[in-house]
Image (cartoon, rainbow, N blue to C red):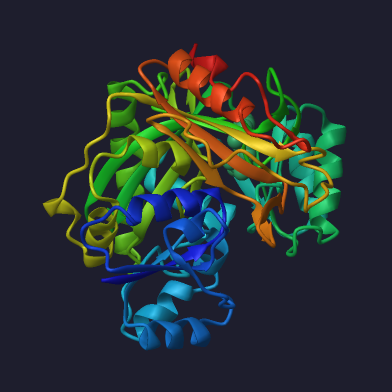
Amino acid sequence: MNVLLIGGGGREHALAWAISASPLLDKLYCAPGNPGIARVAELVALDVTDHAAVVSFCVDKAIGFVVVGPEAPLVAGLVDDLNAAGIKAFGPSRYAAQLEGSKGFTKDICRANGIPTAAYERFTELSAARAYLHKMGAPIVIKADGLAAGKGVTVAMTAGEAEAALADIFDGRFGGAACVIEAFLEGEEASFFVLSDGVNVLPLTTAQDHKRVGDGDTGPNTGGMGAYSPAPCMTAALIEESLEKIVKPTVKAMAASGHPYKGVLYAGLILTKSGPQLIEYNARFGDPETQVLMLRLKSDLLTLLLATADSTLDKVSVRWKDEVALTVCLCAKGYPGAVTKGNPIKGLDQDFGAGVEVFHAGTALQGNQLVSNGGRVLNVTALGVTVKDAQTRAYVAADAIDFADGFCRRDIGWRAL
Ligand code: AMP
């Protein structure tokens, strides 16, 4: 079949890399893609916010399946519009994508179904939110209620920080004026990925990422500086508990609401003393977690994604390599603040050895020269027998790339070492 992949970051390069190896694939297209993805797919300049244009492209090119990478098109209802036109797609409907798009929606599902998560209240008025904040006291967590590209959450250690976060939200910095205020939880964080076809849940695997820009988890938050899989803290017992107490009740509640959740469900967990608690859901694969997941995946990705869309997940299984995968993000200097684009990158055509893949996140071509085109530029990803081994191999490869304007954290994986 012909497949159209939506997106153009490191996650989509990893997905394209895996899909392109599928025996079920005839031709892969990607919109908008990037120069790395161009090695395995034909890039198309489609405006993915124009759903009619995406549908007509699919009809023209006899696309049998559309895989949506990022959250924004899901929340905008791209899968609903494709399905309405009779085109099969991977990813949740607009309604179901609220599990990522609205913190309040997810918290209410947790409350109604006894799913372990931090105690919370929702607010649409600043005065009521402030009153609750002062009743609860710091530390406390303030979350804008909408897609905020990972920037809408403040873990406030003081009431002053919490006040400032509320002011930002109610000034409309994140679009709407609504928030969730929730209790501060302590524990190690881990990501747990499953596929859901609306009824059946197929557990995938676990990962951990590094959000802060600096070594030792210091400095501002980013979209993710690196990741590894599996997460050693997610024991078989904790995976089972997360599946039974968090993921399955969520999938059941969505089905009961008449809006079954179909797609990948990415649970962000905090492992507290009283067990795993849900911090957030994402309605798509993680970035950069997907880069490590795809390196470890032994099964055919396209078969799994199709079974999700076809509601036949009970008929498939998934296998993973025993090795650890670890990815290091090479970023442009200044990230997560302002960066300059257009800086040259060389040395990507060398042989990095078996089990090493360099996924493109923010790159572009200027003539024949590969250049940076964003904050997170490359995801240097390696398999290893141990975390240390994968880490060493990833850094050897990263250091062999000539990107003078680049930098990376030097300690990805430290928690697992
Ligand atoms: P979120 O976007 O909801 O995943 O939140 C971003 C980050 O804020 C998480 O990865 C956690 O590190 C932190 N966080 C969110 N909620 C809480 C909470 N209730 N307690 C402690 N930390 C939290």
Q: Is residue 74 above or below residue 165?
A: below
**In the foreground, 92 or 367:** 367
Decide if residue 112 is in sight here.
Answer: no
Decide if residue 242 is in sight here.
Answer: yes
Q: Position of residue 66 (x, y in %)?
A: 38, 70
Residue extending furthest toward the left: 315
Which quadrant, please, contains the N terminus?
bottom left
User: Is 263 left or right of 300, judged from the image as shown?
Assistant: right
Q: Is residue 63 above or below residue 349?
A: below
Q: Position of residue 77 (x, y in %)?
A: 49, 74
**In the foreground, 398 or 1:** 398
**In the foreground, 286 or 185:** 286
**Residue positioned 50% across, 87% down in the render:** 52
**Residue positioned 28% across, 65% down in the render:** 309
**In the foreground, 162 or 377:** 377
Q: Tell me which image quadrant ligand 1 sits in.
A: top right
